[in-house]
Image (tube, helix red, strand yellow):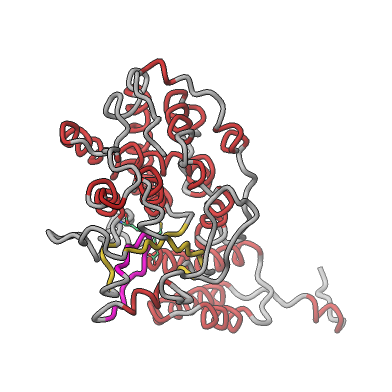
Amino acid sequence: MASCTCSSSLLLVNPPPSTSRHHAIRRNLRMSLNNNDSKLNPSSLLNSVTKLLWGQSLPPGLLVATVRTAWNSTWHLMMSQLAPSDSSGGYSRPASKFRFSSTTPSQGSSLHLYVGLACPWAHRTLIVRALKGLEDAVPVSVASPGLDGSWEFKRAGGPDTNTIAPSLDRANGCNTLKEVYRLRRGGYDGRSTVPMLWDKGSKDVVCNESYDIIHLFNSELNSVAQNPGLDLSPPQLKKQTEEWYQIIYPNVNNGVYRCGFAQSQEAYDRAVNDLFSTLDKLEDHLANSRYLCGDTLTLVDICLFTTLIRFDLAYNVLFKCTKKKLCEYTNLHAYMRDIYQIPKVAATCNFTEIMDGYYKILFPLNPGSIRPAMPSTSEHESLCRPHGRESLSSATLAFVK
Ligand SMILES: N[C@@H](CCC(=O)N[C@@H](CS)C(=O)NCC(=O)O)C(=O)O
């Protein structure tokens, strides 16, 4: 076929690059990605790609291969910042920096709690604070996520007044959580995570590990709690709750993150199997037990609840926890509804904030930021339908004032 020589066609159809040119483009792109390594930023990446592709009319196969190389490298780069991984691509959660040591804050010291509503770890502290009646003793500031995933205090309120909503910083008047952390004695430049318990008196971080904070709320602040008689960690159940926690934390609470943040197929396969084999065991156990440790609601139930309530809203889709939806587990779903219906618990669950927090903020997992529709089984009305679990125990939940 005669080649077209008219000038208008030349503008539209460049001759395809030669095979050696294909290789050179891909090699240069790889080199520019590798050279910059951790210093790479999105605009320099875009510049490199534009420079290399400018004026080239790439055949679709090469275009896909080139963009795939660029996207894979960028994705791994973003993921390594969002979610540190081990050598096999498995998510490795950084340890909390501020744990309780042997010294706990004195009763009634001026504590302030910082949370974010999407966060399952912060959610634990909100529930225990509500059940123990610590709202007056431990005021709260509710951060919202900025587009880079860090926590900010830039908006307050929300359409649903029955549910806890984002707020400004009520303790320190800061614009970001990072600024609050930096106010502490000795400063701080590490990860600024929620939940964080702040001592207004000494202007210091007391703790930023949810498991420690819920134990502190349960047992160390009884003199200022409205429900001092409620013990969510009774001594006779300590061993049992600890054993459950050792199962639930790695496989379910952190297990969903291990699925979502896996950076290799092997790491994902491991995580998803651990998660669903544990959910299957829990489903069996909860057939005959109202809560994990029998008739008594404990802290470990609350730790499990905050993951379950996010499961169909976020983890099933965004974190690829796809073997089953939670609503397909009869006992687990009823158990979750049972806890949701305890007075004051529903008000700690802000589903809009949860969905926005995951789908709009975790950019590497959802680059288009489109928020899927809310599953109907996760709507408030659906969660309020009868759970039928009273028949498993004589426990009454009239303890919550
Ligand atoms: N182990 C901590 C985990 C806290 C955590 O990872 N919080 C996330 C939100 S779900 C966070 O604040 N991330 C912000 C960051 O890493 O900069 C706990 O249980 O309190």
- At 84% across and 76% down in the image, what residue appears? 4
* Residue 229 is a magenta residue: no
Is residue 330 depicted above or below 202 in this figure?
Answer: above
Report x, y in % for residue 270: 33, 42
Figure quadrant, ligand 1: bottom left
**Left/right of residue 384 with respect to residue 91 in the rendered view:** right
* Residue 190 is a magenta residue: yes
Image quarter for residue 46? bottom right
**Left/right of residue 269 with respect to residue 201 in the rendered view:** right
Q: Nearer the viewer, residue 67 or 388?
A: 388
Q: How many marks?
A: 0
Report x, y in % for residue 116: 45, 59
- At 54% across and 44% down in the image, what residue appears? 313
Label the magenta part by its dominant secondary structure.
loop
In the image, the segment drawn in magenta is 187-199
Is residue 39 depicted above or below 347 in this figure?
Answer: below
Report x, y in % for residue 56: 66, 78
**Left/right of residue 224 with respect to residue 380 in the rendered view:** left
- At 42% across and 28% down in the image, what residue appears? 335
- At 38% across and 34% down in the image, what residue appears? 276
Is residue 393 depicted above or below 370 in this figure?
Answer: above
Report x, y in % for residue 304: 36, 39
Locate the C terminus by quadrant.
top left
Check the image and name the residue furthest to the left.
102
Q: Nearer the viewer, residue 348 or 258?
A: 348
Locate the N terminus by quadrant.
bottom right
Image quarter for residue 103? bottom left
